[in-house]
Amino acid sequence: MGAPDIGTLRLGLAFAGLLSLLVMAALWPARGRVPGMGPWLMAALLSALAYLLPPAVQWARPDLGIAINCGLTLSAMLFMLDGTLALRGFGDAARRRMPVVTLCLAILALMLVSAGRPWLRVALHDGLAFLLLLATALALVWRGARWSWLPGWGMATLFTALGIMLLWRGAGLLATGMDLGGADTRTPPWLLAATLAWALGWTALFPALVACAEGESLRQQAERDPLTGLASRTAFLRQAGAGMDRHHGLLLLGLEGLRTLNSSLGHG
């Protein structure tokens, strides 16, 4: 049985792009409980556009088409990194919004500048993709809670594998000096197959990651006071009961006038 041709793989990528977009749209109601859903939805939208454009559009300048495609895929990877950082609680997601959009525009501009310059395009695309995918993989597993180790490590493995393959492709083309031509649109079948497996893989694992994040959010609401971040009465009594022995004790302190202060100035 022969390897699938380019057309079949591109059709599969188009299907994977639409599927990931539908999955992200179905998960959108969870945005109030799971941070980072907005960037991930944008990533799915840009990925779907990138997968659909090459087979659907007859470019007058094929080099321009591949440059736009590369810009869309890199922008999608950047939004995936931003969404993962928000999901893991790294930094302020609101403050990152404008820099991320600015970087996306800069990436698209770089890809357009590289149109007609295949060596520049290969070096920029594969190098940046490797960095973005590896950073996303690290964010998925760094400080990851036990509740998310399975989908988190699974997605991190997929992101790392695709990043290494892209770096291998780019380094191989640059090292061997292959003549790409000014309007090259060729992508190796093995790389298309790897991208298809990556797209289907993260689409399948991401709902599990969101479900785990929702479960952790509900647990935090049940066990943490929203005002102070301290353990709730139920969580405290459970932890205290589990830790009490003849070497430990419990000291209770009362604050005079605290109720009057709360009533006059508010709990906040």
Image (spheres, rainbow, N blue to C red):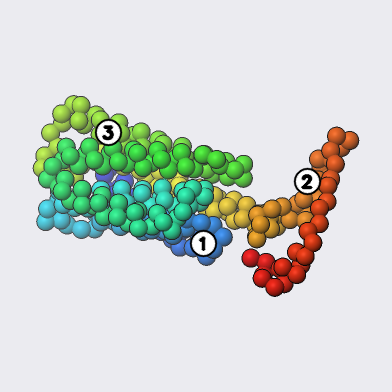
Q: Residues within 10 Å of mark 1 (few under 14, many from 20)?
A: few
Q: Which mark is residue 169?
A: 3
Please state which amino acid type lies under the numbered disc 3. Answer: Arg
Image disc number at residue 244? none
Q: Is 208 displayed left or right of 221 in the figure?
A: left
Q: Are marks 3 and 1 in contact (CB under 8 Å)?
A: no
Q: Is residue 161 at all visible to an observer of this figure?
A: yes
**Is 238 above or below relative to 246?**
below
Quarter of the view holding residue 1: top left
x 27%, y 33%: residue: 169
Tell me which amino acid carries mark 1: Arg
User: Residue 212, percent across and down?
Assistant: 59, 51
Question: Which image quadrant is residue 125 in?
Answer: top left
- Label number found at residue 239: 2
Alpha carbons under labels 3 and 1: distance apart: 36 Å
Say which amino acid is labelled 2. Gln
Q: Secondary structure at mark 1?
A: helix
Write the residue at 56% across / 42% down: 144
| Image location of residue 75, percent across then percent down | 32, 51
Q: Is disc 3 in contact with disc 2, using a CB cutoff of under 8 Å?
A: no
List the residue tagged with mark 1: 31
- Counting residues from the start of the chain, the first of labels 3 and 2 encountered is 3
Q: What residue lies at 75% left-to-right and 70% top-to-bottom?
A: 260
Residue most extreme to the front: 256
Comparing marks 1 and 2, which lies closer to the viewer?
2
